Image (cartoon, rainbow, N blue to C red):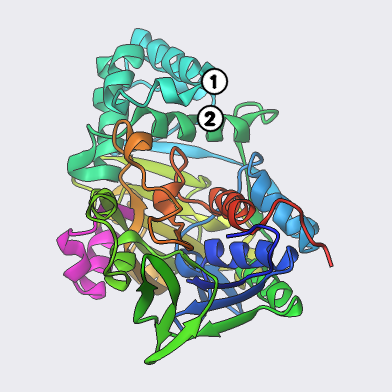
Amino acid sequence: MNNSAKMTVNIIGAGITGLAAAYFLLKKGHQVNVFESAPEVGGLSGFFPVEGTYLEKYYHHIFSGHTGLIDLMKELNMAEDVMFRKVKTGFFYENKVYPFATPKDLLLFTPLKIKDRLRLGLGSLKMMRIRDWQGMENESALDWLRKHSGAESCRIVWEPLLKMKFGDNYDRISAAWLWNRVVDRKKSKEGGGGKEAMGYIRTGYKKLFDELVEAIRRQGGELHTGAAIEKISVEKGKSTGIISNGNLIAGDVIIATMPIPSFLHLVSSLPLEYKARLSAVKYQGSTCVVLKLKQALSDYYWINISDPRSPFVGIIEHTNLISPDYYGNRHLVYLTKYSSSEDRIFSRSKDDIYRDFSAYLEKIFPEFRAADVEQSWVFQDRFSQPVFVRNYSKTMPDMRTPVKDLYILNTAHLYPESRCLNSSIIKARTLVDDIGGKNDDNR
């Protein structure tokens, strides 16, 4: 495709990746159509009404180093909508919640002997000082941690957390993925005395999506919700358009932003080698139970759960990041679990999931009772995050598919970063620069 030519680009998916790509393409003067099968935009960042405002279905926060997201919000005149707050993180082990954020917290973490606490801290410092993640990716996170943080810290801290997040794949995860997580959190602590400073959009992420949609429409882009795509049309090795409701919608370029399994259902003429590379990417799914309470559970924003009997891996008390005043003085809590996209939890009823999660929450907070829950919601997604195994960069699918003018961009392309709005926005901008020309048209 001639980067200087004006194109019609059809984008499948109106999550943050699709909408950011649409916004950047329109700034360059291209015509853009966005198609979303759901009745509303948002994707994994979708939202639901709570107490007169909106909350995300899956927890969200901003690190100070998330410049891609912050810069986009500045362009949308939303700079004043971002607030940062120092928060507490904890670690639940053997029926007790331990503070787990500052160097002092680590020194007082009595489940580990003092020599193991020191080694755990030194291992984290060593990882923070590494500049080139590519030299780490041929080693598993668990092997790296055992070598540099010690066997005991792995047994008590790291191994349970990796198992809870990645299940049977826990010992295959690339050390480069863990490096990114540690470095991201290090940035959030800089200048905060060891406590993490995390950010949030004051009135919720719905405002970001509303502003992004308005900016797209203002620049002439078209957005179609409730528009299921049946097929991507390919002729003689080139994409010719998308088929929706039996109609062919022509275009010069197609960008597909859905998970790989969904993408494979839409394209029947991919080369076998590329299709095999796509199929090799395995996914973890997410389950989030959201609780609305009259009282706070704790003063922690985030508590990691190190107990294989727990049905969830983390407690994220949203209203310890943003004031409960925004939600009618109610307290909102996420209980989150990650599991294989094939896990049986995705066939269980939401009532059963809620009962299991709330019952275990009573074991962590004995004063909590299910009767304290004014309202609850259960959200699930089978394909929320790829499993980033060792040497993933060597097998990661290219965003440019073998089909001419057909591109794919989703969470499988964010490595070594985890799924987050920031990395999705940065990747969208990179792809747009590749296919749409380097020089912005700020009309």
Number of marks in the rendered image: 2
What kind of residue is marked 2? Val
Q: Which residues are magenta?
A: 337-359
Q: Is residue 69 magenta?
A: no
Q: Residue at x 44, y 37 (%)?
A: 416
Rendering coords of residue 421 (x, y %):
55, 54
Q: Residues within 10 Å of mark 2 (few under 14, many from 20)?
A: some
Q: Looking at this rendering, what residue extends furthest in the right direction?
A: 443
Q: Does the CB distance between marks 2 and 1 fall below 8 Å?
A: no
Q: Residue at x 48, y 63 (%)?
A: 405
Which residue is denoted by mark 1 in the rendering?
Answer: 131
* Quarter of the rendering containing residue 81: bottom right
Q: Depth check: give the residue in front, 161 or 283.
A: 283
**Could you tell me which quadrant the N terminus lies in?**
bottom right
Rendering coords of residue 327 (x, y %):
60, 70
What kind of residue is marked 1? Arg
